[in-house]
Amino acid sequence: MKKIIIALIIFSFCGCGLVPAYRRAQPDFQKAANMMLYGGSKNMVRSDWGEPDKKEILEDGTEAWTYYNRQDGRTFIFYFNKKARLVRAKI
């Protein structure tokens, strides 16, 4: 019985290790859509996309991060509220 439990624990850890590789394999627009759908934050965007090419703070306090020349020459802009939550993405 203990061997079965240990084997299940090992398999669950192996499965968790594959998730980041899957996210890296997704196209950029799919990553952006998933972040908008499931909620994202500055830390989540930074971990998936790296440091932005341009950061600016808009008049309403929203922070905009711009990533230039991503896949297919697209530019992605992520907008964050004051609590560092992703509120909008523009491709």
Image (cartoon, helix red, strand yellow):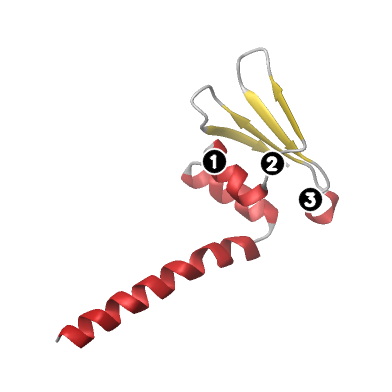
Please, is residue 9 above or below residue 32 in the view?
below
Q: CA distance from mark 1 to mark 2?
A: 10 Å
Q: Residue furthest left?
A: 1
Q: Mark 3 or mark 1: which is in front?
A: 1
Local secondary structure at mark 1? helix
> Which of 5 and 22 lies nearest the eye of the viewer?
5
Please name the amino acid that badge 1 sits on.
Asn
Q: Position of residue 62 (x, y in %)?
A: 61, 21
- The image quadrant of residue 65 is top right
Q: Give percent across and percent down for residue 23.
A: 58, 61
Query: In the image, residue 19 lies at what x, y percent?
Result: 50, 65
Q: Residue at x 47, y 68 (%)?
A: 17
What amino acid is labelled 2 in the image?
Glu
Pointers 2 and 3 in contact (C-beta within 8 Å):
no
Within 10 Å of disc 3 (Cα), the crowding (few <14, some 14-19, many 20+) is: some
Q: Which residue is denoted by mark 3 in the rendering?
A: 70
Q: Tell me what residue is drawn at x 72 percent, y 38 percent.
A: 52
Q: Report which residue position mark 1 lands on.
A: 43
Q: Which residue is mark 2?
A: 51
The nearer-to-camera label among 2 and 3 is 2
Identify whether 82 is placed above or below 4.
Answer: above
x, y percent for residue 79: 63, 30
Q: Amino acid at mark 3?
A: Arg
Would residue 62 appear left or right of 54 to someone viewing this image? left
Q: Residues within 10 Å of mark 2 (few under 14, many from 20)?
A: few
